[in-house]
Amino acid sequence: MKSSDKVILIDADVVSHFITGGEAAVIHEIFPAHKIYILDKVHAELQNWPSNEIRTEISILLSQKKITLMNFPEDNEIIKKEYFWIKTMQFKGDG
């Protein structure tokens, strides 16, 4: 895989830290040569957070194409194993 083909997959903690830190608008500047994706499961978790700011900022990031929504890759065994490990061993939520 070429460096330009790589993507960045972010979770709910990463997004929420950028938003609460007032830096949501620059999230895409960390790796400017790569697309940043958020899984549908992460997006769903963020939509259930009590903070209106989180929900609003996620919508803005998506509409401005600073992050891209991605369906969970059910056919990717590596990601499925990592996701299962995080959920069971780290006791983390869906996002």
Image (spheres, rainbow, N blue to C red):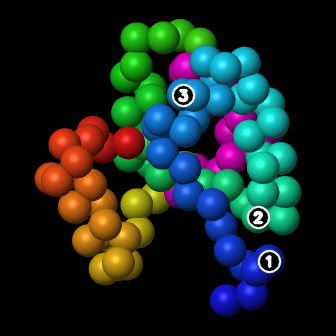
On screen, 88 above or below 81? above
**Contact, mark 2 vs mark 1 (Cβ under 8 Å):** yes
Q: How far across and how far down the image is residue 66, in percent?
A: 76, 44
On screen, 49 above or below 9? above
Q: Which residue is mark 1?
A: 4
Report the span colored magenta: 54-70
> Magenta includes 12?
no
Residue 19 horizontal side relative to residue 72, left or right: right
- Classify residue 7 by image quadrant: bottom right
Q: Which residue is mark 3?
A: 16
Residue visible at 72% across and 29% down in the picture: 24
At label 1, the amino acid type is Ser
Which one is nearer the viewer's eye here, 73 or 24?
A: 24
Report if residue 86 is visible in the image: yes
Residue visible at 27% across and 55% down in the picture: 86
Which one is nearer the viewer's eye here, 56 or 10?
A: 10
Q: How far across and how far down the image is residue 82, in percent?
A: 31, 66
Q: Which residue is mark 2?
A: 34
Extreme residue in the left direction? 88
Whole-angstrom CA distance, mark 2 to mark 1, is 6 Å
Whole-angstrom CA distance, mark 3 to mark 2, is 20 Å
- Local SS, label 3: helix
Q: Quadrant of the C terminus?
A: top left
